[in-house]
C-alpha cells in the first residue's frame, strides 16, 4: 500500500472571500466638489497611521460619526488616493471589535497604501460620511493652493 496523499480527498483550506472587491475607481473630483457643503456642516479631521493589517485607529473620528461595530458601512473608492465610507443598511464593511476602520487589501493595493502610511481622515456626522485621503492624493489636491501662499502671492 502506498503512503501517497490523494489530493481529491484533502479539503480546500483557503479562506473564502466574505467581502466584495472594491469597485472600479471613479475619476477623482475636485477638492471643492468633495468638501462643498453648507456652511453649517462640520467636518472633523485627523491624521492616522495604517497598521500592518490595513486597520486605522482614530477614536475621535469614530466618536464624531457615532458609528458602532454593529453598523454596516459601504465603501466607494474615489480616484486612486481616496475612499469614502458611509453607513448603509446593505453595506459589507464593519468597524473592527476595537472600533478601527478596516481598509480592504484591494483598496490598499490600488491606492498604494502600505503599513505605516499616514492618512487624512475627514468625518462629517451630518452626512454620515468618512473620507480617507492618502498623503499623495492630499498633496495633489492642495498643492495648487501653495503657489498663492508664496511671498508676494495672495490667499
Image: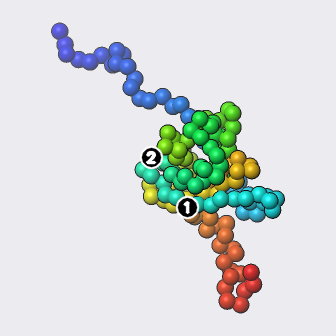
* Residue at 63%, 40% in the rendered image: 73
* Residue at 80%, 59% in the rendered image: 40
* Residue at 73%, 59% in the rendered image: 42
Q: Secondary structure at mark 1?
A: strand
Q: Secondary structure at mark 2?
A: loop
The crowding category of the residue bearing disc 2, from other C-alpha atoms within 10 Å (few below 14, some 14 to 19, many at least 20), is few
- Front-most of residues 144 and 68: 68
Q: Check disc 2 and report the residue beneath it.
A: 53
Nearest-to-viewer mark from 2 and 1: 1
Quadrant in which the N terminus is drawn: top left
For residue 128, side relative to residue 121 (left or right): right
Q: Check disc 1 and report the residue beneath it.
A: 47
- Front-most of residues 24 and 131: 131
Residue 133 vertical placement versus 75 (above, below): below
Residue 47 vertical placement versus 148 (above, below): above
Q: How is the image coloured?
A: rainbow
Give the percent coordinates (x, y) of residue 32: 76, 63
Give the percent coordinates (x, y) of residue 71: 62, 37
Give the residue at the far bottom of this rendering: 152
- Front-most of residues 52 and 108: 52
For residue 119, side relative to residue 32 (left or right): left
- Front-most of residues 57 and 131: 57
* Residue at 54%, 54% in the rendered image: 58
Amino acid at each position: 500500500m502506498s503512503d501517497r496523499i490523494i489530493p481529491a480527498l484533502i479539503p480546500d483550506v483557503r479562506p473564502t472571500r466574505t467581502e466584495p472587491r472594491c469597485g472600479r475607481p471613479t475619476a477623482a473630483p475636485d477638492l471643492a466638489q468633495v468638501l462643498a457643503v453648507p456652511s453649517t456642516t462640520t467636518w472633523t479631521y485627523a491624521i492616522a497611521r495604517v497598521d500592518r493589517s490595513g486597520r486605522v485607529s482614530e477614536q475621535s473620528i469614530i466618536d464624531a460619526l457615532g458609528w458602532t461595530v454593529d453598523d454596516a458601512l459601504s465603501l466607494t473608492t474615489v480616484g486612486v488616493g481616496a475612499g469614502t465610507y458611509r453607513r448603509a443598511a446593505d453595506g459589507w464593511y464593519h468597524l473592527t471589535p476595537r472600533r478601527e476602520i478596516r481598509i480592504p487589501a484591494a483598496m490598499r493595493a490600488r491606492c498604494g497604501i502600505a503599513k505605516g502610511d499616514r492618512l487624512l481622515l475627514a468625518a462629517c456626522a451630518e452626512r454620515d460620511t468618512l473620507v480617507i485621503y492618502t498623503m499623495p492624493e492630499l498633496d495633489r489636491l492642495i498643492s495648487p493652493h501653495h503657489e498663492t501662499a508664496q511671498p508676494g502671492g495672495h490667499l
